[in-house]
Image: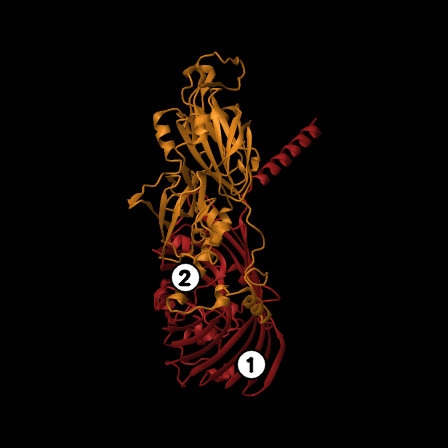
Amino acid sequence: MNRRDFLKTGAALSSAAMLPAAVLAESAKLENVKKFPQPIKYRMAGDVKEFEIFIDITEVEFAPAMKLHMLAFNSQVPGPEIRVNQGDNVRVVFKNKTELNHTIHWHGRHVPWRMDGVPYVTQMPVMPNQEFVYEFTAEPYGTHFYHCHWGTLLHMQAGMFGSIIIENPDDPIKKSFPYEREYTLIYSAHDVDFMRMELNDMLERMKERMYLMRNGRFDKERFALFDSKDEFRKAVKAGYQPPYVVNRRAPSELPQPNWFTVNGKSYPSTPTLYIKEGETIRVRLINAGTEEHYLHLHGHDFWLVCDDGLPVPQPWQMNTARLSPGKTLDIIIEGKNRGLWTFHDHDTRRVTNNGLYPGGNLMLLVYEDLPMEERMVGMMPMKGMKMSMKGGKEKMNMLPKVALDE
Amino acid sequence: MLKHKTTYLSITLLVLGFSLASAQVSPEIRLGARGVMSFNVDARSDETSSAINDFSDTALLLGFRQKLYNKLRGQLVVGFQFPDADSELGQVFYHQVFVKLENRSNMLKLGRSRVRSALIEFPTLRDDDALLFTDVLNPFSNGENTEDNQYGNVIEGTHLFGQRVWLRVHGEHFAKTPLSPSVAEADFGLNAIGLSLQYRVPETQMWNRPFLQQVGLGLNNFLTDRRGFTSEIDQALKNVSFSTILNVRADPVHFWDIRHQTIFNLGFDEIVRVDDFAAMARTKSVATFTSLRYLYRKLERPTAQLAVSLGYKAFPDLLTDTNQLQAVAYGFYRLGENFDVGLQYQFLNYSGDLKTLFGDNEHRIQFSLVFSIDQTWNNQFDDRDSLLNLEHGHIQ
C-alpha cells in the first residue's frame, strides 16, 4: 500500500470510527441506558407483586453485523430486571410462547422447593403455550439472577437469563459506601454455531413431540423420560440407546464459546459505566455463562462488597475480580482517577469477537465530567510532528475510537 | 545484484503468499458419502444371472460453502460416483462439479450436476432403478448408462417466491452417446432448456405441514437435429411433467405418504417404431410412476421403511401396441445411524417394440447394505429452510 492509499484508507477509517466518538454526549448516555437490564413493572394483587414474563424467540444483535436468533424473556436479552424489596411476596406468571420446553430457576433464592424451576425434579416443564405461576417471598436480599433450567447448556447461552435484585432498605453496603448510581452487568459466553444448530434441532424434535402430545401419545424411550432409574436401566438392558451415546445423538465435542457478551452485547456495543469524579457507584456483576471471567479495571482498585449477593464480612480492595459461572459479585468503584478506563476480562480470549481482538466483554468506565482539555489523546507522531499532550487539535485526536482489528 | 533482487522478490512473494493464505476465510465443509453395495439376482425371460457385488451409485461428495459480501453465499461441490460396470463411463464418473451463487431468494448454478429431468425423487434402492419412468429421457443418449440421463453440464437460475414456491429456469448440455472422443470433447453446447414451478413444504416443517407436501409442473425441451424440420420449435422435443407428494398420514412415528409423477413426452410424430434408446426417448409417450411409502421412526430417526411403487408407460404413436410396466417393492431396516440393510424386488414387463430392446420381462431381487453420511464442519450460518429462519425471521 502506498502512502496515498494509506492516507485514503486512514481517512475512511477515521470517519467511520468517529461514529460513537461522542461517548460523553447526552445522546450517547441516553442510548447507554438501554444497554442495561430494563426493570419490569409489576401490578399489585393484594399484597403480592405480580410480574408477567414470557419467553419467545427473537433476533438479537451482539454487535453491528452480528445478528442471531435467541431465546428472549419479554423479547430482551438479558431478560427484564425484577426489582423487589426483601420480604415482598412475589408472583411471576410465566408464559411460554416458544415451541420448546422451559422453566425458570431462581438462582440463589430461598424459594419453596416446588418453585425452584428444575424440570422433573421440582416441577413439570412449562410446555409450549403453557403458563406456570411462580410464587415466593423475596429472600435473601442482594444481587441474584434467574435462568431457564431446561436444556440449560443451550437455553442459558441462548439468552434465557435475567437479574433479580432484592433490595434491603437497610442495606449495609449503601451505608458503608453511599452511592446514587448502580449498574447491573450480566456476563455470558456463546458458541453461536452450537446455539443455532442445537436450537434448530430442538425445534424440529419438539414439533414432532408436540404432534404426539396433542394426540395423547407418549413414549418413554422417544421422550427419554422414565419413571425411575430402574426402569431406565431395564430399558437399556432391553436395547434402548440413550441420547448421549455416540451411536445416537451425542455431539462430537462440547460447545466452545466464540462470542462473549455483557448484557447481551459484545464490544463495541457493550454498555458504558459512567461515573463522576468523587462519586461512588455500585456495579452488580452476574455470570450467567459457562466461562470464568477475571474482570480487571484499569486505573483503579475497587471494593468487593458482596459475594453471591451476601455482604462479605470485610470488603477488600482489588483490581481484578474472579467471576465464576453462577456467581454474582458486587463491587464499589470510587471515582478517584478521572479519565476513560477499560474494564475487561483479563482472560483476553473473552475480549474477542469470533477470535478477533478487541471484542467480547470489553467495556469502558467513563468519567462524564472529564474536562474538555483531557478528552484529547496524543496520536502517534508523524514525521516532522512533535508529540505534545498540550498541543492543539491538529496534533491531538478525540477519544474514543472504535478499533476492531489489531 | 540481479541475483539479490531476484531473491528479495522471491522472499517478498513468499511472505505475501503467506499473508494472503492466513487471510483466507474458512468455508463450511460438507462431506457426503454413500456406499451402496448389493447382491443382485436377475431372472430375465431368457436367462438368469447374478452379480455378487454391485456397487454402482456409490458416491463421494465434497462441498465448500461460505458467506460472501452483500448477503450472497458461494458454494463449490465436487463429487464422483462409481457407475455401472457396463456403462462405458470408466471406473469413476464425476457427477457433481459445480459452483452455486445464491442469496435468500435467488440461486445460480453452473457446472456438472443433476439435470432437472425429474421433479421429485422416489423411494427405490438406487436413484436410477425406475429411471425409464421417473425421468425425462435424454434423446441424445444411446442408453448404455443412466448417467447420461441424470447428469449434465447445467446452467440454472432459481427464484423462490416466499418460502415455498420455486421457479426454476434451466439449460443443459446432455451427453451425446456414442460419439468419438474428439467430438465429445468439443461439443458442450446447450442442447436442452426447461423450466419448472413447484410448491414445496420445507422438510423441517414436516410435522406441521398440511396434506399437500409438494406439487410441481415442469417443461423440458431438447434441442434436437430432427430431420426434415428447420424451425427450432419443431426440432424441440418437448416433455411436460407433473408431480405431487401427498401426506397420507403425517405422523412422526408411522408416517405415510404417496408420491406421483407423470411425464408427457410430446414426441416426434414420425417416430412410429422403436429400435433404440434414442427413438424411445423421441417418440410420444406417457409415463406415470406412483409410490406409497411407510416410514417407521422409532426414536426420532428413520428406523424402517417400506415402499411399493408402480410405473406404467405407454407409447401411443408406435405401430405396434407398446408399453412397459414396472413394479418395485423396497424396504430397509436401519441397523444404526447411517447404516441400512435393504431388500428390493423389481418386476419389469415390456411389450411391443420394447421387447426387442429389453426382453419380455425381468425379475430382480437385490439385497443391499447402504452406508450414507452427510456431515458438516465449520457450520457458520443457517440454511434457508431452517426453522429459525423460516419461523423466526430470516437472518442472512
Residue name at image x 49 percent, y 67 percent: A220
Indicate the chain coloured red by its letter: B
Q: Foreground mark, 2 or 1?
A: 2
Q: Marks 2 and 1, how far apart in space?
A: 38 Å
**Picture coordinates of residue A164 (x, y %)?**
41, 41
10 Å crowding of disc 2: few (<14), some (14-19), many (20+): many
**Picture coordinates of residue A17 (x, y %)?**
44, 28
Above or below, comparing residue A59 to residue B291 in the picture: above
**Mark 2 secondary-structure assignment:** helix
Q: Nearer the viewer, residue A96 or B175?
A: A96
Q: Disc 1 sits on a residue from what chain?
A: B
Q: Confirm whether residue B278 shows in the render.
A: no
Q: Nearer the viewer, residue B275 or B379?
A: B379
**Mark 1 secondary-structure assignment:** strand
Residue type at mark 1: give it: Ile
Q: Which quadrant would residue A274 be assigned to in this image?
A: top left
Q: Nearer the viewer, residue A106 or B163?
A: A106
Q: Which residue is mark 1?
A: B365
The image quadrant where one finds the C terminus of chain A is top right
Chain A's colour?
Answer: orange
**Picture coordinates of residue B3 (x, y %)?**
70, 30
Q: What numbered label is drawn on residue A207?
A: 2
Above or below, comparing residue A164 to residue B331 in the picture: above
Q: Which quadrant would residue B20 be assigned to in this image?
A: top right
Query: Would you say the residues marked 2 and 1 are in contact, meaning their CB atoms lie under 8 Å apart?
Result: no
Q: Disc 2 sits on a residue from what chain?
A: A
